[in-house]
């Protein structure tokens, strides 16, 4: 039964209400037509949609359109992102069961059945106007759901093109095209609210305003937290390897990823050696006066300057007014003492890395915590080290969902072929980041599970087994 958008109707026009009602009606009809699909059929549909973005000419065309639409990132890296994330997500999805019997353990007397959550409302950002919608659509379809995408207005054209490709892929394999839909232009706040209130599940990626709005909608919602990743370069790190990975990660798609490094914390005893390795990898070490130029230009009235964020290094250097030689750098190092009030302690969405000098590892942990308290708590942090006790300490002491060890953070945090994280473009940050999940968004969040429970041999311990140790220590009063 369709839900009613009670709270938003008062603010919405008849045309907005009619548009959402039509989308929801078609989505539910498509789900009804797709109901009963077995796992092989579901996987065939997911594969078709994945190929729609992975296909080389499509991946490139959508990357070009995304950069042209939004002015964010760069084409070559978006091609890689479109293909790598889709390929990795498809690998994960094809290894999972999500419809019919998904788990059957006779030893427990429990059989689990996967069932759809319903119509998914997907809020997607301008930073990934093709990759994120397709990634979420693959996960939604894996659970035999329908999805309606509410894109960033700036990225609507490229998201719409991705949706058209997905719909064509669905038609090709004989599946209902209306399993994937998009809000029509112009995307309004009211339409997004109406969609969220009528959907069965919201998955919100993008600004924290979008995430908070999703949680306020009254519909079950999954949101993601803000990034602001701090990474330690430890005393015994392989400095050249660390520098190369940091450069590759920081510069990928011009630092649009929430998993991009935003602060480096370098141990004092190897500080200058690490800076030298970073410069050899393509970093520009800013002078104090250049640091102030960046501070004055990267933020306008407290907000990040859209003319500088996610721009190529030469565009950034000229826009800020750095030394002409800085145009040939790959990314920029700004050194300062940690100050939570400094804008450089926050996420920068640009090729700027804030660098802090740590007296020792205790101080480094303190700085990681300080950066995340400014922004990014719950998201992630990283370390380059040969001392395996230090990552363990970060995992034990820092309130983040992910701690990456000796990895290029952007490539590892959202899933990689050489780590165990699920491929995704949406990173849950737990209650630390105001989120309902503390893992990478994955197929499990797009299914309901029915548990068929039968009687097994009784498993009831004695009172002595449960209370004996307590009574022996504290008595039975």
Image: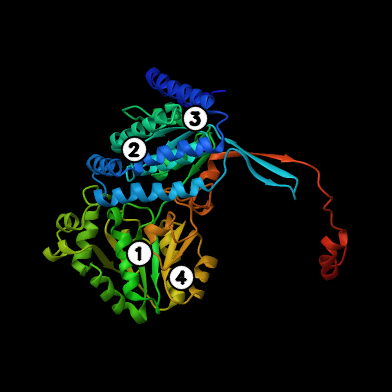
Q: Are marks 2 and 3 in contact (CB under 8 Å)?
A: no
Residue 468 seen in the figure: yes
Give the numbered dot on residue 197. 3
Q: Looking at the image, is mark 2 or mark 1 earlier in the sequence?
A: 2
Q: CA distance from mark 2 to mark 1?
A: 27 Å
Q: Position of residue 349 (x, y in %)?
A: 31, 53
| Nearer to us in this view, 312 or 424 | 424
Q: Residue at x 20, y 58 (%)?
A: 313
Q: Are marks 2 and 4 in contact (CB under 8 Å)?
A: no
Side of 124 relative to 353 (left or right): right
What secondary structure is marked by label 2?
Answer: loop
**Circle 4 sits on which residue?**
365
Q: Is residue 221 above or below residue 373?
A: above
What secondary structure is marked by label 1?
Answer: strand
Q: Looking at the image, is mark 1 or mark 4 earlier in the sequence?
A: 1
**Circle 2 sits on which residue?**
152
Side of 407 relative to 348 (left or right): right
Q: CA distance from mark 3 to mark 1?
A: 38 Å
Q: CA distance from mark 3 to mark 4?
A: 42 Å
Q: Is residue 318 above or below residue 126?
A: below
**Circle 1 sits on which residue?**
263
| Nearer to us in this view, 74 or 152 | 74
Looking at the figure, which quarter contains the C terminus?
A: bottom right
Seen as rendered, the residue at the extreme left is 324
Q: CA distance from mark 2 to mark 4?
A: 36 Å
Looking at the figure, which quarter contains the N terminus?
A: top right
Crowd class of label 3 (few under 14; some 14 to 19; many from 20; radius 10 Å):
many
């Amino acid at each position: 039964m369709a839900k009613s958008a009670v709270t938003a109707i008062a603010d919405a026009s008849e045309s907005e209400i009619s548009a959402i009602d039509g989308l929801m009606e078609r989505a539910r009809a498509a789900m009804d037509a797709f109901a009963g699909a077995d796992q092989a059929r579901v996987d065939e549909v997911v594969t078709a949609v994945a190929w729609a973005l992975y296909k080389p000419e499509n991946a490139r065309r959508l990357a070009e359109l995304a950069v042209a639409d939004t002015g964010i990132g760069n084409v070559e890296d978006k091609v890689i992102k479109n293909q790598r994330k889709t390929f990795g997500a498809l690998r994960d999805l094809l290894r999972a069961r999500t419809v019919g019997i998904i788990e059957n353990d006779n030893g427990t007397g429990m059989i689990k059945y996967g069932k759809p959550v319903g119509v998914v409302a997907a809020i997607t950002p301008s930073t990934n106007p093709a990759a994120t919608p397709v990634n979420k659509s693959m996960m939604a379809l894996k659970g035999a759901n329908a999805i309606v995408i509410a894109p960033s207005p700036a990225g609507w054209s490229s998201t719409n093109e991705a949706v058209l490709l997905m719909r064509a892929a669905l038609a090709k394999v004989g599946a209902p095209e209306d399993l994937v839909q998009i809000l029509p232009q112009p995307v309004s706040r009211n339409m997004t609210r109406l969609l969220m209130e009528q959907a069965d599940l919201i998955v919100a990626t993008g600004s924290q305003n979008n995430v908070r709005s999703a949680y306020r909608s009254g519909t079950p919602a999954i949101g993601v937290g803000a990034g602001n990743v701090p990474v330690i370069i430890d005393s015994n790190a392989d400095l050249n390897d660390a520098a190369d990975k940091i450069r590759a990660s920081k510069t990928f798609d011009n630092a649009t990823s929430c998993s991009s490094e935003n602060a480096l914390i370098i141990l004092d005893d190897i500080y200058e050696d690490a800076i030298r390795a970073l410069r050899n990898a393509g970093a520009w070490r800013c002078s104090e006066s250049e640091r102030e130029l960046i501070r004055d230009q990267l933020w306008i009235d407290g907000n990040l300057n859209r003319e500088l964020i996610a721009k190529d290094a030469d565009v950034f250097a000229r826009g800020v007014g750095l030394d002409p030689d800085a145009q040939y750098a790959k990314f920029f190092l700004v050194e300062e003492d940690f100050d939570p009030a400094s804008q450089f302690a926050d996420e920068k969405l640009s090729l700027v890395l804030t660098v802090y000098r740590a007296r020792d590892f205790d101080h480094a942990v303190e700085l990681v915590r300080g950066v995340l308290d400014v922004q990014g708590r719950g998201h992630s942090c990283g370390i380059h080290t040969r001392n395996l006790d230090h990552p363990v300490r970060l995992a034990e002491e820092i309130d983040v969902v992910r701690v990456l060890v000796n990895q290029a953070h952007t490539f590892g945090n959202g899933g990689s072929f050489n780590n165990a994280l699920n491929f995704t473009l949406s990173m849950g940050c737990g209650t630390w980041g105001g989120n309902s999940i503390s893992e990478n968004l994955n197929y499990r969040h797009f299914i309901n599970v029915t548990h068929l429970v039968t009687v097994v041999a009784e498993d009831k311990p004695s009172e002595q087994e449960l209370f004996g140790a307590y009574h022996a220590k504290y008595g039975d009063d």
